[in-house]
Image (cartoon, grey):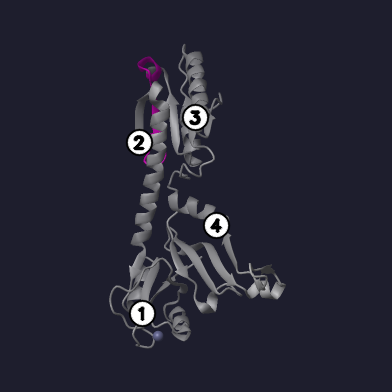
Amino acid sequence: LPYVISKRPEWDKFAGAVYSIAFDTVFPDGRTLQIGTAHDLGQNFSKAFGISFERENGTRDYVWQTSYGISERVIAAVIAIHGDDRGLVLPPSVAPIQIVVIPIPYKGSEEEIIEKSKEIAEKLKINGFRTQLDLREKLTPGSKYFEWELRGVPLRIEIGPRDLKEGTITLVRRDTLEKKPVKVDGVIEEAKIMLQNIEKNLKEQASAWLKNKIHDAESLEAAKVILEKESGIIELGWCGNDACGLKFEEKIDAKVLGTPADGKKLSVKRKCPICGEEAKFIIRLAKTY
Ligand SMILES: [Zn+2]
């Protein structure tokens, strides 16, 4: 998942933390979702709870602590950001089932096709792919495709009579729905490459989407127009004063995500649109979940 990392503002950081950072991603409707946070707690909690350690020289000091939070929200973000109109699209790295093998039985060669499907599924499993063989007899191959697409399985392998005669099977990608006939002998190598390509493609698509949703705004008016039109993350210049930071939220009816903690800096001179002083930081705002 692509995200931006921001230092949370003083007035809205985790209580007791010295420094908090948050990871935010942009949903398809343009609102942001905070998918994780990390905090430098300093000695605030260790002093309160008396957690100390002994130094090499025998003196004692309170420990320094960090904490982080990451939750099921990440799963929601994976579903919302990678999914399409056919259902889930799961990146191979997190998919519980990476490959589904579906036989296409044909009169006279049912047994042969089932046997070959079992053999290929076994081979994939032995080679470390999380593989499911779908042998349900009551469902047509077409309805199986539909179901596994809905469930976001990255790669489908179809094994039919024509394929077997030619010594090939068909690989179908969930992300692009592209079909590729491959030699039975080369299935492990091909599956590996295709899963890598799916992972890469999903990452690139999502990164391009996020990049497109980060908007530089020169003024509050410009920020308001962007928020109304396409939402996403707005970056404005900020003097650094909390009072101004809070006013941003009122004036453009969005929430402050923070200032970039990923090294991004103002590339041009800007004024703080609230007080008119020279801007020292970028401040990020968005409509949030
Ligand atoms: Zn200001």
- Please determine whether, in this image, residue 27 is positioned above or below residue 275: above
Q: What residue type is labelled 2?
A: Glu
Q: Which corner quadrant holds the N terminus?
A: bottom left
Residue 224, can we see it?
no
Q: Distance between the residues labelled 1 and 2?
A: 45 Å
Q: In this view, does 68 lie to the left or right of 286?
A: right
Relative to 82, residue 96 above or below = above
Per the model, the C-alpha gap separating discs 3 and 4 is 32 Å
| Residue 73 circle label | 4
**Which badge, 3 or 4, is on the more N-terminal residue?**
4
Element at badge 3? loop
Secondary structure beneath label 1: helix
Front label number (1 vs 3): 3
User: Few, some or many C-alpha atoms within 10 Å of disc 4 (few <14, some 14-19, many ≥20)?
Assistant: few
Looking at the rendered structure, the secondary structure element under dot 4 is helix
Q: Which mark is residue 220?
A: 1
Amino acid found under the numbered disc labelled 1: Leu
List the residue tagged with mark 2. 178
Callout 3, which amino acid?
Asn
Residue tagged 3: 127
Query: What segment is highlighted magenta in the picture?
Result: 163-177
Q: Where is residue 276 in the image (x, y as percent from the top left)?
A: 34, 88
- Are the residues tagged 1 and 3 within 8 Å (C-beta)? no
10 Å neighbourhood of mark 3: few (<14), some, or many (≥20)?
few
In the image, residue 289 sits, relative to residue 132, either above or below, namely below
Quarter of image, ligand 1? bottom left
Mark 3 and mark 2: span between their CA atoms? 24 Å
User: Which label lies toward us, 4 or 1?
Assistant: 4
